[in-house]
Image: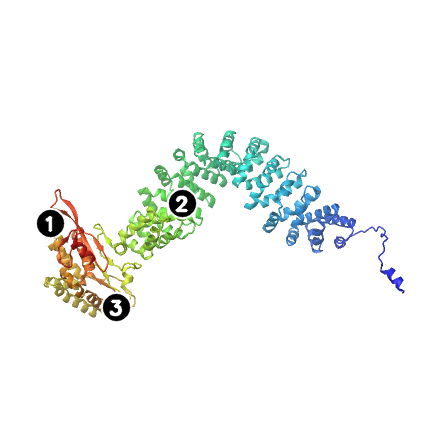
Amino acid sequence: MGKKAKKEAETPCKEPFEPLPVEGKTPETVVLLLSSPEEDILVKACEAIHTFAEKGDDNKVSLLGLGALEPLCKLISNNNRLVRRNAFMALGIMATNGEVKSALKKKDVIPSIIDKLSLEEDTVVHEFATLCLASLSVDFVCKVQIFDNKGLPPLIQLLSSPDPDVKNNSLEIIFNLVQDQKSRLAVHESGGIPPLLELLKSDFPAIQHLALKTLQNVTTDADTCNTFREEQGFEKLMEILSNKDFSDLHAGTLQVVANCLSDSESLQLIHKDGGLKRLMEFVLTPNTPDIQSNAVKCITRVAHSSENRKLLHEQNVEKVLVELLSVADISVQTATCQAVSVMSFHLASKDSFRDLGGIPAVVQLLNNESLVLKEAAAQALSYLTHSNQLNMFAVYEAGGHEVLVQQLNGSCLRTLANSAATLGNMAAQEVIRCSILSLGAVKALVEPLNSTDTQLLVNTTQCLAVLTCDTEARAELQSAGGLQPLVNLLRSYHKEVLHNACWAISVCARDGPAAVEMCTFGALEMLQEINQSVNRRSRFSELAMISLLNSNLSAKYSLTSHLASTDLICDGFYDARAGQRILTLEEMSKQPVNEHRPIIVVNTAAEETVETEERQSNASETDTSSKAERRTPRKKKEEDKQKDEPLPESPTEKPWKMMDDVSLQLLIKEAKESIIPLTDEREQCAALARLVSEAMGGAVEMERLHEYPWVLHLSELKFQLQANVIPIGLISKGIYGHRALLFKCLADCIGVSCTLVRGEYNRAWNEVLLFNRKERPAQPCRYTVDLMHQPGSLLAPNTLAAVQYQTI
């Protein structure tokens, strides 16, 4: 073949091919035709696929398997309007199938679909494009894509389309989108409220219902409610509610009304237009449960205004609500309980509910299986019993307290919180409180203390604060392990939780053992931190601190270095080291012997053994003129007893108990016998001071104080006892702090009023309040008691002698 002939063969023929009728009898052939460059063939192929897909889901899946989806996604953007239209028809029908929809989500087709929603496009394109998006918009990822590609504005425009299918599909997409907050905001910003309201007049019930459902979602936003009001939304809703032909729309319409009654302007508007009266008619007239429940919800929203509560009370709304409590529908009963809660803010309404028999009806609902209804009923009771004694007893007489205590073991946090609130209200009455406690309420309230739910913590701590007014309740809370989670709540930064926790702690601290246990959990340190904070400090935290310290004098003296005359030292008091975490006496007793100064403990309890009686008898026969002589044989006997005691046979460790202090018992006995008979307070103080000085080594000249071997003596005692804790009665060479503590201890035992004050450098002193007989009339004056240098001397305040005693 020559070059010329070869060139002619390679040149394409410019003559058009004669029209060739193509008949595709199989789906495979038609799908192949979707890749044709000829528009006429594409139009016919898309139309054929649409027809084939309409016949059923099996055909849609078959087309998916043949690869029809990929070319169709491209053809919806074809320049030929007819090709685009038929491609959308085919794609829209196929997208209604679940498998096709899943495959379609993986393709980036949403921007192309949204691009064809402009008003210039064919109505058929709008119909099937929105049908495709409606199928995709149920998926969260697709909803985000539609929103991000600015799909809402064109969809809102299509709500005014003359084609009902376009309206319905667009509504469905918008409804799916407004499940998210940002889309709800975008709807009213894009002018979506007017067309939605207009669709309520549609001739198609499906569109009306879908428009109402969409409005129910968007009107949960405050700004949308404002737009709704400005567009005469209330008037249009009232028209629907007044039209009996639209009875199927009444339930949804009432829900929209309820959403929009959250602000005062809407309340005034609905009241002005007679809407409130119409709502009452819906409540009074027997209707379907959803209409009644939504009508009651509207009443509840209206009742958020004090003026409207008064108006509703004048219209005897309480009677209607009490009747609705007996309606055999959970949604109606739940809505009614919520209305009762709000109306209870009106004092007269509380009494009306009681007089009409509403309280037993609400109590009965606590036994319902519905968790939502239980929560609403418990909440209603909490409001009804708040500051209303008669209602408290009405709940009590109906057996409500028993059911409420049972609810404390439930799993619904809101029901738990409401039950605790109601029980806390009722526990203010002693008779009811005793009954609540007998049902095990305190133990049931321990677990909620570990919750992270704020309202539950607020109500639980408040309830415990009231219940633990009883001694037995405090002991039960302690034994149930409730003190530690209660103390842990001091870490809370929620104001009300912190206040109530402090309140409950201040009540529980009335018991010494409970106060000590709370201190071991770090309550004092946390309260100190709270009271130093400007933002967290309150009357409650200060009260809790005071209560803890008053019930734990060891901690009080350690932290404040002061005991008042009303702070009476009792067994178990110990002089802990200041500036450290306060451990219990048992914890310190079990620590290995260390180099720190010993812990001085007070224990006046007498032993009940024969050996102790013999020891006391022998000790009392010794010469009392010398404390050292009196104590030496007793120490020897104690050491001999410890040596002679056999080792325990049982491997079980014996429970810890304080070391006996017979010497202190003898001192108390001597003080009672020799000092109480004295009639003059000055003489009593002076005699007691001399007794303390004699017991602690006698007077020491100030100039020779540095030679006094008290440190060596205490070290010897620690070594002999092999303990860091030393009974105060064993100290025979004591310095200021030891003598002042012993003076306070003995004074409290015999009824002599005095304080205990700690200064610096191991100094401490006692102050007594005596009348100055030189003044007329006699005035009380505070004196410092000298126990060290001139025992028995009373040093007037601000004198050189008193200052030297306290500071040198």
Q: Secondary structure at mark 2?
A: helix
Identify the mark at residue 748; answer none if there is no mark: none
CA separation in Å, label 1 and label 2: 60 Å
Residue corresponding to mark 2: 419
Q: Which quadrant of the view contains residue 82? A: top right
Residue corresponding to mark 3: 648
* Residue 703 in picture, x, y percent from top left: 15, 62
| Residue kind at label 1, given as amino acid type | Asp
Q: Is residue 311 left or right of residue 228?
A: left
Q: Secondary structure at mark 1?
A: loop
Q: Which quadrant of the view contains residue 425? A: top left
CA separation in Å, label 1 and label 3: 52 Å
Q: Nearer the viewer, mark 1 or mark 3?
A: 1
Q: Is residue 468 left or right of residue 800?
A: right
Q: Is residue 159 above or below residue 31?
A: above
What residue is rendered at 59% in x and 43% in y?
175
* Residue 397 in picture, x, y percent from top left: 36, 40
| Residue kind at label 3, given as amino acid type | Pro
